[in-house]
Amino acid sequence: MDSSGPAGPVRRRGAVVVVAHPGDERRKAADPRFLVIRRSAKVIAPRRLCFPGGGIEPGESPEQAARREFFEEVGGTVRNLRRVWQNVTPWQVRLDWFRAELASPPESLRFDPAEVEEILWITLAGLLAAPDKLDSNAPFLKKMIAGEIG
């Protein structure tokens, strides 16, 4: 695991869930689409594109937080959750990045409008090129595209 990031004390912890579209995984698509959310205008970093995720609550493991945040934000469940990377953002947030498979059908996903404005399926390169992406996703995206993270 890469723990790259700025030096200094970690102030918060978070978990991020990265899920490829099940149809793309089944067909072994060369450039799969991933579930991305556009954050609500009412939250920190409003209207930014990012993977589902959020803060780890006291007494909660990163895996538990990943599952909870995914359900809270998009109303879905995941399986085969595995940690693939860790980093610390410039804001001293330690993130645990998880790959997972969607356990619910894509058409059943329903976002929470208090946290999420829309759900999108987008390629990694498409998200990296998006001017409205959450900047803290860029290091992960670059490593995924380069094949350094599976």
Image (tube, rainbow, N blue to C red):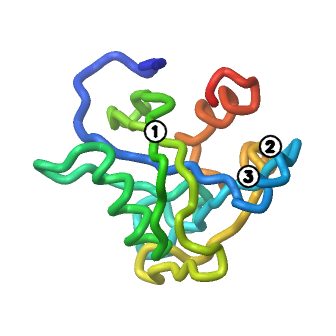
What residue lies at 80% left-to-right and 43% top-to-bottom? 125
| Label 1 residue SS | strand
Badge 2 amino acid: Ala
Answer with left or right where residue 137 lies relative to residue 16: right
Badge 1 amino acid: Arg
Front label number (2 vs 1) = 1
Mark 1–mark 3 Cα distance, whole angstroms, equals: 29 Å
| Label 3 residue SS | loop
Residue 66, relative to residue 138: is it above or below?
below
Badge 3 amino acid: Pro
Position in image of residue 40 (x %, y %): 50, 74
Quarter of the picture holding the C terminus: top right
What residue lies at 45% left-to-right and 46% top-to-bottom? 81
Mark 3–mark 2 Cα distance, whole angstroms, equals: 12 Å
Q: Residues within 10 Å of mark 1 (few under 14, many from 20)?
A: some
| Label 2 residue SS | helix
Q: Earlier in the sequence, mark 3 or mark 2?
A: 2
Residue at mark 3: 131
In the depicted view, which residue is nearer to us: 35 or 8?
A: 35
Residue at mark 1: 82
Mark 2–mark 1 Cα distance, whole angstroms, equals: 22 Å
Residue at mark 2: 125
Position in image of residue 11 (x %, y %): 23, 36
Image quadrant where residue 53 sits: bottom left
